[in-house]
Image (tube, rainbow, N blue to C red):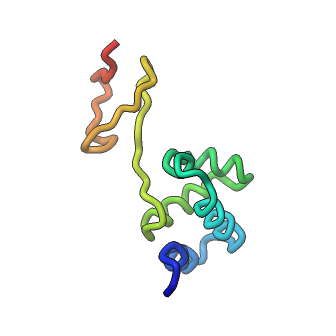
Amino acid sequence: MENPLESRLDIVRGTGLFPPGLLDRFAKWLGSAPEREVFRINPLGWAKQNQVDENLVIDLFLHATRAGVVDMLWSVLCTQCGILVTSPGGLRAMSRGKRHCRL
């Protein structure tokens, strides 16, 4: 029986857009990183930490999301208090003028 992660990564490999070494490093990181780190990943931070072009990593994470390797959910930190602000409708449902902070 094939590993579900590997079968999903094969979908990303099939695009031919990413160097095999990058996909291997990404898979190794997914398998060994602490759960909290994977849960709160910042693709730009991952790119910097792994010395990979930011645009390539953004493409990698988007393709990995489409293949079901990861789920990408966007959150916003309140500029007033630092609390994580979520919206059922995603970023588009957030109003620019509306404050989310109770301070």
Instruction: Left or right? Give the position of 90 relative to 83.
Output: left
Front-most of residues 9 and 5: 5
Q: Position of residue 40 (x, y in %)?
A: 51, 45
Residue 12 visible in rendering: yes
Residue at the extreme right of the image, as rendered = 51
State the residue at coordinates (53%, 46%): 36
State the residue at coordinates (70%, 55%): 52
Q: Position of residue 74 (x, y in %)?
A: 41, 44
Instruction: Left or right? Give the position of 10 relative to 92.
Output: right
Instruction: Left or right? Give the position of 26 relative to 101.
Output: right
State the residue at coordinates (66%, 51%): 47
Q: Is residue 15 above or below residue 43?
A: below
The quarter in which the C terminus is drawn is top left
State the residue at coordinates (68%, 54%): 53
Q: Position of residue 93 (x, y in %)?
A: 26, 39
Q: Position of residue 15 (x, y in %)?
A: 54, 76
